[in-house]
Amino acid sequence: MPLREHLLSPAKPQKAAAKKNGRRKLAVSALISLSSIMVSADVLANAGKDTGSGVTPSDSTAGTGWIAIGTDATANTYTNVDGASAAMGYHASAMGKWSTAIGSYSQSTGNSSLALGVKSVSAGDRAIAMGASSSAGGSYSMAMGVYANSSGANSVALGYKSVASGATSSALGYQATASGDDSAAFGNGAKAIGTNSVALGSGSVAQEDNSVAVGNSTTQRQITYVAKGDINSTSTDAVTGAQIYSLSQSVADRLGGGASVNSDGTVNAPLYEVGHRHLQ
C-alpha cells in the first residue's frame, strides 16, 4: 500500500485502543473529582482541624442551620426546630436559640443574643455584648466596650468598664455607672445612683432620686446660657441670675432710703432719717 494511503487509511485497532484509553481516563477523572468533593466537604466540616460540635442537622428533634467553627466550639439549639445558633472561635459557645457567639471563649446563652469579642457574654434574651470581656446580662440590654457590663433589663453600657445595672439605665463613658432604675450617667466616672437620676460630666454623682448632678461634693460646675424660667406660684422652672438680680432690685426700690443692690444680688440696707436721726 502506498505511503499516502497507509497514512490516510483508518486504523481500526488503534481507534479501539484509543477509545478504551479514553474511557479509562474518564473514570480516573471522575474518581479524582469525587475525592476532591469529599475532601472539600471534610475541610468545611473540620476547618483547621476543627473539633467543634453542634446539634446534628438530621436530628428531627433538634434545631437546624447551626454552625460551629473552631476548636471546641459549640452550637446548641436544644429542641426547638426553628432555632439556629452559630459559634465561631476557640471554645465559642452559642447555647441560646437563634444566638451568635463570635470570638475565643465567647458565650451567647440568651435567645436571639449576640456575643462578639474574646470572652464576651450575652446572657440576656436579645442582648448584645460587643468587646473583649463585655457582658450583657439583662434582657434587651447592650454592652459595648472592653469589660462593659449591662446587667439591667433594657440597659445600655457604652465604654471601657462602663456599668448599667439599673433597669432601663444608661451608662456612657469610661467607668461610667448607672445603678439606679431609669438612671443615666454620662462622662468619665459619672455615677447615677438614685432612681430616675442623671449624672452629667466627668466625676458627677447623682445620689438622690429624681435628681440631676453636674458635679460632686468636692467639684461643682456652673450651668450657663440658661433661658429665663417662669416665676409664679406654681412654677417649677429654673431661674437665671438676671432674674434674681431683678428681684433684688425690686426689693431695694421699694425699701427706698438709698437701698441698693450689689453685683452678687445682695441688697444694701437703706438709711432712713427720722427726726434728725438716721436709722438703718
Image (cartoon, rainbow, N blue to C red):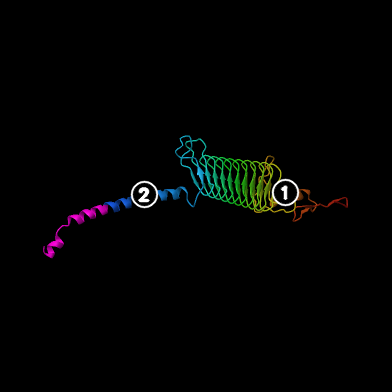
Residue 224 location, quadrant: bottom right
Location of mark 1 (residue)? 247
Magenta region's main secondary structure? helix
| Figure check: 243 above or below 60 | below
Secondary element at image label 1: helix
- The CA span between labels 1 and 2 is 94 Å
The local crowd at label 1, few if under 14, some if 14 to 19, many if 20 or more residues have their Cα within 10 Å, is some
Q: Which residues are magenta?
A: 1-22
Badge 1 vs badge 2, beta-carbon distance below 8 Å? no
Q: Residues within 10 Å of mark 2 (few under 14, many from 20)?
A: few
Marker disc for residue 34:
2
Q: Nearer the viewer, mark 1 or mark 2?
A: 2
Q: Is 120 displayed left or right of 215 in the figure?
A: left
Position of residue 116 in the picture relative to residue 176 (left or right): left
Q: Position of residue 98 (x, y in %)?
A: 50, 41
**Identity of the residue furthest to the bottom in this view:** 3
What kind of residue is marked 2?
A: Leu
* In the image, residue 21 lies in the stretch drawn in magenta: yes
Q: Secondary structure at mark 2?
A: helix
